[in-house]
Image (spheres, rainbow, N blue to C red):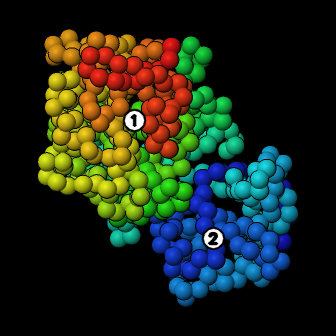
Amino acid sequence: MSSSDFALVPIRWTKRFLRTDASQPVGAVRLVITAIRRNQWVLLDWISPRGLMQHSPLRRSELDPMLVDARQDIPVADALRLGDSQPSQVVDRDSQKIFTGNLMPQIPWLNRKVMVDATGQPVAIGVPQQARPKESVSRHSERSDDRLGSPRLLWQSEPPEAHPTDYSIVRVFYATDRQKSFKSDCYAGRRCPQGQLKYGTCDISIPRDHRIAKLESPKWSRFQFSWNPSKHVQILECRELRSDPFYEALTLQVGSSELSDCFVFIHGFNVSFTDGVRRTAQMAYDLGFKGAPILYSWPSAGRVKGYLADETSIEWTRPHLELFLNDLASRSHADAIHIIAHSMGNRALVKLLEMLQIAGRQLPQLKQIVLTAPDIDAGEFVQLAARFRGYGERLTLYASSNDLAIQFSKKIHTYARAGEAGNDIVIVPGVDTIDASAVDTSFMGHSYYAERRTLLSDLFYVINAGIPPNDRHGLEARSCARGPFWAFRA
């Protein structure tokens, strides 16, 4: 179609774009866009000669050639002469679904629309869809340009039929020592033979009508047999990155947050990589977390019968977790790092904290440490906590007397677990113990930390504000022979 041809074609909207200021130097913007794939969208913001905010959407593959020969110290707006050009048209939500006019390939952003919300903030880019030959695209791809260190696509869902305003996207960063898989899980429930850490990002959909504390999935009872991002918390894309691009992208997201912070979620027993990523995204969304959410995924077998195998794998992963946390502290430029560990994941974290304390090694950015339903011997935990309790700004332990998985673990190991409440509740100086029995009504009673609105609200005040339990709404002070603790009001 030539530039003189009149177009009447549908517009496809995408919410997945990197927004950047065109007043930044060319060199800085080129460094930023190296963290994204070549076909991903970049939205350039620039100020017109009349002082109005304008937008120009380009794919990275279009922007790269435009900047390659430009001086690296001049603004991108000057290099592209945006002030002498027209911007993309700005439209309201759902107000335009058909492109009409002349397509102009020489100025690509003139063919595109930018959808804004009620506050004028861009939320989607509209691209006219021209007819093109169908291509055979594999959902699993191992193609990458090693010379450029390009990200490696491990998984991509089928193109969603949902409108981009029907869901939000949460980007989760991950580090894992799992063996790679070419199925939808991206990584398997087995150990990486060399014990090497793999890094990457996953884009997760959160439905517009998402209910707090819910992890929406297809339900056969509702005749839902496939994933839909407008209805489910779904992995849209998973990309593996090398170490340097991973930390560059992570630093960018950390730096864009008000508090320059991140949180690391260490999952527990019987959790696949996919479920761990989805849970991390759900928590980040429900907590309103503005920093970078990170999953540390160790090789849980992802099945109940794999309990004993998981017990050995959580010990095996400990030095890899240590390496990751040390790198995170030194390379992310985060001012605050929070850690949320669940179930068996607490074993690696607690023993690592003890080792670091004994060695006199501090992680000054470590702020909130949250231990949820810890599947660890209660007596051992008391001994370990006495040595690492000075770590972090605050240590919080959530326990429950209704946790069936913890009760199962107690039967196997005979002795009480640190995640138990009731008569065996663990109380250690320097650790805020919270009895969550009153709010735990989930099926297995083991994921209450992320499946209960009340507990998520409490976790919000811990992670986002570091508020002590005495000042948190919904908790009441209690005491027993071993000392004081707190509990949720029934």
Question: Which residue, given by chain and number where applicable, does mark 2 sit on?
Answer: 21
- 248 in relation to 164, above or below: below
Query: Does any portion of residue 396 appear in the rendered image?
Result: yes
Question: Within 10 angstroms of label 1, few (less than 14), some, or many (20 or more) residues?
Answer: many
Question: Which residue, given by chain and number where applicable, does mark 1 sit on?
Answer: 276
User: Could you tell me residue 418's position as x and y percent?
Assistant: 26, 24
- Name the residue furthest bottom: 71
Query: What residue type is disc 1 on?
Result: Gly
User: Could you tell me residue 90's position as x and y percent?
Assistant: 80, 60
Decide if residue 198 is on the left or right side of residue 447. Answer: left
- 30 in relation to 244, above or below: below
Residue at (50, 55) in percent of width and height: 259
Residue at (15, 45) in percent of width and height: 355
User: Could you tell me residue 299's position as x and y percent?
Assistant: 26, 36
Q: Which mark is residue 340?
A: none
Q: Are marks 1 and 2 in contact (CB under 8 Å)?
A: no
Say which quadrant the N terminus sits in.
bottom right
- Name the residue furthest left: 359
Decide if residue 170 is on the left or right side of residue 193. Answer: right
Q: Quadrant of residue 368?
A: top left
Of 73 and 188, the residue lying toward us? 73
Query: Does any portion of residue 192 appear in the rendered image?
Result: no
